[in-house]
Amino acid sequence: MFKIGDFSRLAQVSVRMLRHYDKLGLLTPSHIDRFTGYRYYTIDQLARLNRILALNGLGLTLQEIADLLGDGSEVPVDQLRGMLVLRRKELERELADKRWQLASVEARLQQIEQENDPDPYEVIVKSLEPLPVASIRLVSPTVQEVGYYCNTIYGQLYRRLREHGIEPGEPEVTFYHNEEYADTDIDMEVATAIDGAVLESAPVDDALIFRAVPGCDLAAALIFEGAFEDVVAPIQSLLRWIGLHKHVPAGPLRELHLSGPAHKNEAPDSINVIELQVPIAPIAGR
């Protein structure tokens, strides 16, 4: 048996919390010396302690945990694993939401700080040639989930192209079709360039779209190097430039992945090269 201090080190739980669990009847010592009052624990009690900590990490209160474990029964490992997996997904989504909020706040702050400074991005105006693509169109429930949906659907796109024996080309492009700003129901199209000859005999596939993206005479564009979650600021900068130059968007925002497919796992220090393009037209009545 282990004294409470030794058990504390083994379990990585403070003595104070062990005493607290004992007081609540969650984890009572295996033995208490009636002369010294020393508490002793056995290694077998680690299993119950780990369940207490896991359930507490899931957001259950100690009272709820006491009610759940009060009859001495143990939560089955498979059930506990399922609960933990669900909680992990919730935390990952919350973290993604916070990251997106932080990126949005930083982008707005950058706009405010640079109101009287030259734009940090070099915007050019150019024409766009028609682009034959294979794509999948989908709706992301929220703007925070765009990255997850892109990664998932790009994987499906390439898998289906392989099944049809079609070689994807470059660049990979994500289109954002919402005509107005939206932070929910993001109408997206994930695409990759293909040989134009494929369009003449495209296979029948309910999930895939084979089309030639129309060209345009005028498009505003800029190059951004960085993480995909930091693309908010350059998008806002590009749209601001368009407005300042008395034009309006005349087609969906295009996000070209010049450094290669975005769905592939990359090293943490890798830099993505992204070209943002927006077809534009003069403000009516100008």
Image (cartoon, rainbow, N blue to C red):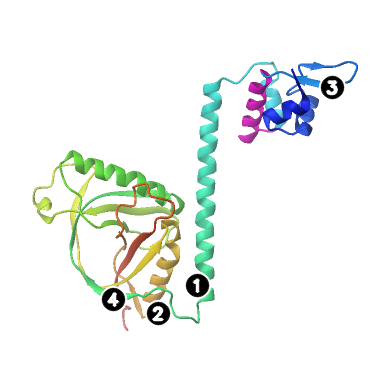
The picture places residue 216, in percent across and down from the top left corner, at 21, 70
State the SS at label 4: strand
Q: Specify the segment rendered in magenta.
A: 44-61
Left or right: 121 with respect to 116?
Answer: left
Q: Are marks 4 and 1 in contact (CB under 8 Å)?
A: no
Between disc 4 and disc 2, the foreground one is 4
Say which label, 3 or 4, has the lower sequence index: 3
For the residues labelled 3 and 4, the Cα–Cα distance comes to 79 Å
Left or right: 193 with respect to 101?
Answer: left
| Residue of label 1 | 111
Whether the magenta-drawn stretch holds residue 137 is answered as: no
For the residues labelled 3 and 2, the Cα–Cα distance comes to 76 Å
Which labelled disc corresponds to residue 244? 2
Q: Residue at x 53, y 57 (%)?
A: 101
Say which label, 4 or 2, has the lower sequence index: 4
For the residues labelled 1 and 3, the Cα–Cα distance comes to 63 Å
For the residues labelled 2 and 1, the Cα–Cα distance comes to 13 Å
The picture places residue 196, in percent across and down from the top left corner, at 12, 56
The picture places residue 103, in percent across and down from the top left corner, at 50, 60
Q: Are marks 4 and 2 in contact (CB under 8 Å)?
A: no
Between disc 2 and disc 1, the foreground one is 1
Between disc 3 and disc 2, the foreground one is 3
Hey, which quadrant is residue 74 in on the image?
top right
Amino acid type at circle 1 is Gln
Q: Are marks 2 and 1 in contact (CB under 8 Å)?
A: no
The C terminus - image quarter: bottom left
The picture places residue 66, in percent across and down from the top left corner, at 71, 25
Amino acid type at circle 4 is Val
State the SS at label 3: loop
| Residue of label 4 | 125
| Residue of label 3 | 38
